[in-house]
Image (cartoon, rainbow, N blue to C red):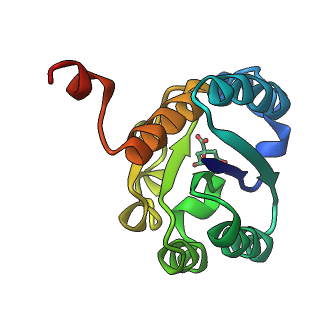
């Protein structure tokens, strides 16, 4: 299984950008930690980050041929990019929407996610752990069953 971890605008500045909101972990640190977690699950990760809407769309298009799923933090595009929403809808692989902060507990404009209806789910508010939880969610999706269900058989 191959999963793309795609980060949108301003997430390249994680660690120094509003640490009170987003924490002090850099995007590189998140990628390193996630790679180890994925390896243990038998999942290969690819990483990309862009501050540009069109480039994020191109990367999503390419992912449909190269990856089995996507973990996407679309940053502020989450709240208004119908173009990214349409790109997610256009590709057949599952996309998990991720946010470090709890977007529902912040400013009103962040409460809306225009991409949520075309993602398989949303994970929001667990800091850098949101990416781990998204990876676990995708692993469950790939296996089509949870370890708990497996144990109770
Ligand atoms: C974010 C939340 C967005 O509202 C914001 O624009 C971001 C980061 C998060 O991870 O909490 O850039 O997606």
Q: Is residue 68 visible?
A: yes
Q: Position of residue 106 (x, y in %)?
A: 47, 40
**Residue 18: quadrant of the picture:** top right
Q: Position of residue 135 (x, y in %)?
A: 54, 37
Residue shown at the point (39%, 42%) measured from the top left: 143
Depth order, front residue of 46/40: 40
Q: Is residue 10 visible?
A: no
**Residue 127: quadrant of the picture:** top right
> Hey, which residue is sitting farthest left in the picture?
153
Left or right of 115 on screen, residue 27: right
Residue shown at the point (76%, 22%) measured from the top left: 25
Q: Count numbered badges in the picture.
A: 0
Q: Position of residue 55 (x, y in %)?
A: 80, 72
Left or right of 138 on screen, residue 18: right
47 in relation to 67, above or below: above
Quadrant of the frame with the C terminus: top left
84 in relation to 101, above or below: below
Left or right of 42 on screen, residue 104: left
Residue shown at the point (78%, 47%) measured from the top left: 47
Q: Position of residue 114 (x, y in %)?
A: 45, 67
Left or right of 1 on screen, residue 124: left
Residue shown at the point (58%, 34%) measured from the top left: 131
């Amino acid at each position: 299984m191959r999963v793309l971890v795609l980060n949108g605008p301003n997430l390249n500045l994680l660690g120094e950008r509003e640490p009170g909101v987003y924490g002090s972990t850099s995007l590189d640190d998140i990628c390193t930690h996630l790679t180890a977690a994925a390896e243990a699950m038998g999942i290969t990760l690819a990483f990309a980050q862009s501050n540009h809407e069109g480039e994020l769309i191109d990367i999503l298009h390419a992912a449909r041929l190269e990856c089995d799923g996507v973990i996407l933090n679309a940053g502020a595009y989450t709240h208004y990019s119908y173009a990214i929403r349409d790109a997610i809808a256009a590709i057949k692989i599952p996309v998990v929407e991720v946010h470090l902060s709890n977007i529902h507990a912040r400013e009103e404009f962040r409460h809306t996610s225009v991409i949520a209806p075309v993602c398989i789910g949303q994970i929001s508010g667990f800091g850098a752990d949101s990416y781990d939880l998204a990876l676990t969610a995708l692993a469950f999706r790939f296996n089509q069953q949870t370890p708990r269900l497996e144990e109770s058989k």
